Image (tube, rainbow, N blue to C red):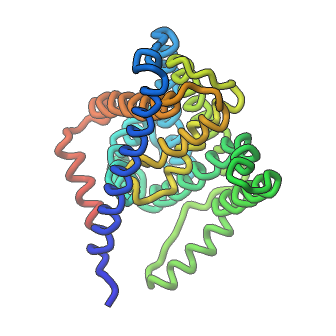
Amino acid sequence: MPPSPATRQRLVTLAGFVFVGASLYFLCLSMARGIRESGGIGNLLNLNLGLFLLSFAVLQIHLITCGWSWRSVARLTGGRLGFWKSYSIHFLAQVGKYIPGKVWAAIGKYALSCDSGMTKTQTGHALILETVFIVFGCLLTAMPLVPSAARAAGMNGMGAVGLAVLLGLVTISAAHPAVFGFFLGIASRLTGKKMDFQRTAFPRVLQIIPVYLVVFVTLGIGFWLLALSFGLRIPVFPGVFLYPTAMGISYLVVFAPGGLGVRELVLVWLIRMVAPGAEPGMAELVALAGRLWVTIGEVMAFMISLSLYGTSTGNIIRMFSRRGTT
């Protein structure tokens, strides 16, 4: 007898916490070994405060573009959200990504967007388009790293590039109204429920791609500056693509809440690939610092969003709960 959905969810949650714990243990162990090899933590911690503050300023630009991206996708499906409303919806919902399963952030965004005047059809379509754009944007920003990463993994570089291009084309094709409608029709027949979506001309859909490129590139520039502030010399190209690539891979691993562990492990591997002469332990230190750097930025954005959205925390939690049970 197969396990019930509740049991499967508990198993996924357990697997997520075990994976995160094992990953962070490995990273801390590796960093401790690097500290010993480098002669002490003082040889690794040489923070350039000016570069660090600059990296945090660029991170704020990235966070603003995240709100812009949700506004752009919402408008594509017919929603009429203002910029700051979109910003607050995005970051109030972001806390859900730290719950295993990758669904709570979407549930939160769905609840808050519907509460802000978007229809269920508009919001549901926007969430699917957002996922398509995130995956496609990550594939685009990862492209400069694909040949080197493939060779490091023992694969054919050009073959890996071809596969990445094919995956990108397949991903973006899912946003085409004809393809989207085809799969929605299959889902309707399987569930016995009529499903609809906001039909949008495909050229208009493609116009959103530059928005997501700005989202990922600003994140990458911010992290590159963060790495420099710790004394890790990474070339600007492909250095600005490291963090978006690691984030994209962690986004696809559904059992790791917020990509914890996955993003850091991938990032360490990528840093060692592009900066093989880095001090022992430096890659791990910067990867962990990157997680803290982003988390602080998102917490600040969340606090700002609480006041921007204009309702109490209790009301927001109740909205999440109602949507999560429907």
Looking at the image, the residue that sits furthest to the left is: 314
Tell me residue 299's x, y (percent). Answer: 33, 32
Tell me residue 146's x, y (percent). Answer: 72, 47
User: Measuring 66% from the left and 51% from the top, which residue is drawn there?
Assistant: 205
User: Measuring 64% from the left and 63% from the top, which residue is drawn there?
Assistant: 174
User: Measuring 42% from the left and 35% from the top, which residue is drawn there?
Assistant: 291
Looking at the image, the residue that sits furthest to the right is: 158
Quarter of the rendering occupied by the N terminus: bottom left
Q: Nearer the viewer, residue 186 or 139?
A: 139
Looking at the image, the residue that sits furthest to the bottom is: 1
Residue 323 in the figure: left or right of residue 62: left
Quarter of the rendering occupied by the C terminus: bottom left
Q: Is residue 277 visible?
A: yes
Tell me residue 270's x, y (percent). Answer: 61, 40
Q: Nearer the viewer, residue 27 or 174?
A: 27
User: Measuring 48% from the left and 18% from the top, which residue is drawn there?
Assistant: 57
Q: Nearer the viewer, residue 233 or 26?
A: 26
Residue 293: which quarter of the image? top left
The vertical placement of 307 against 163, above or below, is above
Q: Is residue 111 visible?
A: no
Tell me residue 225's x, y (percent). Answer: 56, 21
User: Total label count?
Assistant: 0
Residue 162 in the figure: left or right of residue 9: right
Residue 145: which quarter of the image? top right
